Image (cartoon, grey):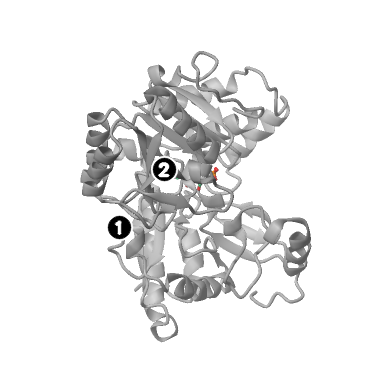
Amino acid sequence: MTDNSENKQSKLFALSKTLVPGGVHSPVRSFKGLHTTPRFFERAEGAYIYDVDGKQYVDFCMSFGPLILGHRNPKVEEALHEGLTRGWSYGACEPYSLELAQFLISKLPHVEQLRFVNSGTEAVMTALRLARGVTGKNKIIKFNGCYHGHVDSMLIKAGSGLAGTAEASSAGVPDGVAQDTLILELGDIEGIKKCFLDHKDQIAAIIIEPLPANNGLLIQPIEFLKFLREVCDKNKALLIFDEVISGFRVAFGGMAELTGITPDIVTLGKIIGGGLPVGAIGASRFIMEHLAPIGKVYQAGTLSANPLAMVGGLATLKQMTPESYKIIEVQTEKIVNLLTSWMQHFNNGQFSMFKVIHFSSLFWIVPSLEVKKLADIPANLTENFNKLFEVLLDRGIYLAPNAYEVGFVSLAHTDEVIRDMEHRLEHRIQ
Ligand SMILES: Cc1ncc(COP(=O)(O)O)c(C=O)c1O
């Protein structure tokens, strides 16, 4: 339903705009540039999500990643119900976070201790402070095209000066903060070497999404990630893998497991809370004990390790097996093939410029399979994607409403759902 002049959600959006800036609680939900208003969803089940006007969609946004089992997985729901009967916040020690911590640590050889926070942004903020506290240095290398939440020092874009110089990409970020972030292009090995020479003994850490998945899917060669490990070791800097998306999505141990590269600090979020607010920082005991109350790096949180998020996360992760990762990859391939074939044929090839890059259970619709850094992304991507998005929305297939977001496949995207997609698209791969 793209004509939303009189429906419930257009009324809700009008109301929302009076109450909330832009009508949304996070900018990517805003449907900016689209010819229709944001869908307001009231319930979800498995691979499906339902808007307030009763329309059903196959969901590939999946809350931007946490729901690897799909919506309302019965065992997660049961664990949450049970949790509710015990109380939902104590602000004190409890056993539930220990169970989740034990589970996570058992799957992450590079993590001896971890601390739970409430979001990926908070995890990154703490990881950066921790890296600075451990090394006694201030500067952080970040890559253009990687997103690490809305921490001041990460809302930075490449400056117009020398390689590595940076300026704020958001109003409200002080120049002083921007100066401690050094921006480089993904894959720019020479730039990184030079940066370490130019800022000798000042770089605390390199932070990277080892599978950059916030400006499309910018899959990096393993050699580049290995180089980052080496250059950090050589310069006594820490390597931070931001695995908020990739952790427990591409494998239990995220990209660290798939590449065999050991980061010094890992940040996690999304899947480890099963769809409830969560984040975590993990590292060796030596690094983690720099945090208060033992160490001098301060970090705290009223709702940290919220018991519901802990049981939701554990009930999710306990259902994942090595086999689940294989299944979800196979389902992703089927979905990618269906979308690719449909895009070639639909409306005399209206979307035939698009290909689909995929990795594990993530996919990204883009005109070229050779996109490795931000500068490789075609300038007219949004314009073409928006048309595609609206056609799919009309047919009851919901992608994240932005060309730079990836699609998330869950274990609830079964063959039956794929057959349903074929009906919705009126297309079948022969
Ligand atoms: C890699 C990465 N880091 C950090 C964040 C921030 O997480 P949150 O939105 O939970 O603050 C995100 C969010 O998408 C992310 O993808």
The image quadrant of residue 247 is top left
| Label 2, residues with CA under 10 Å away: few <14, some 14-19, many ≥20 | many
Could you tell me residue 140's position as x and y percent? Answer: 39, 38
> Residue 276 location in percent, x, y?
60, 39
At label 1, the amino acid type is: Lys
Q: Quadrant of the C terminus?
A: bottom left
Which one is earlier in the sequence, the residue at label 1 or at label 2? 2
Q: How crowded is mark 1: few (under 14 residues within 10 Å), some or many (20 or more)?
A: some
The extreme bottom residue here reads 348
Left or right of 15? Residue 155 is: left
Q: Nearer the viewer, residue 430 or 319?
A: 319
Q: What's the CA distance linking mark 1 and mark 2?
A: 22 Å
- Marking on residue 372: 1
Whether residues under marks 1 and 2 lie with C-beta atoms below 8 angstroms apart, the answer is no
On whether ligand 1 comes within 8 Å of the CB at mark 1, the answer is no
Q: Which of 393 and 22 is in front in this view?
A: 22
Label 2 secondary element: strand
At 70% from the left and 22% from the top, the residue drawn is 90
Q: Nearer the viewer, mark 1 or mark 2?
A: 2
Quarter holding the N terminus is bottom right
Position of residue 157 relative to residue 110, above or below, is below
Q: In the rendered structure, which amino acid carries the disc numbered 2?
A: Thr
**Any part of residue 128 in sight:** yes
User: Residue 36 shows which numbered tag?
Assistant: none
In the displayed structure, 188 sits above or below 262; it is below
Residue 181: mark: 2
Q: Nearer the viewer, residue 296 or 38?
A: 296
Q: Give SS at disc 1.
A: loop
Relative to 7, say whether 195 is above or below.
above
Image spot of residue 58 (x, y percent): 55, 61
Q: Which residue is drawn at 66% across and 52% down?
A: 25
Across and down, in percent, residue 214 comes to 44, 53
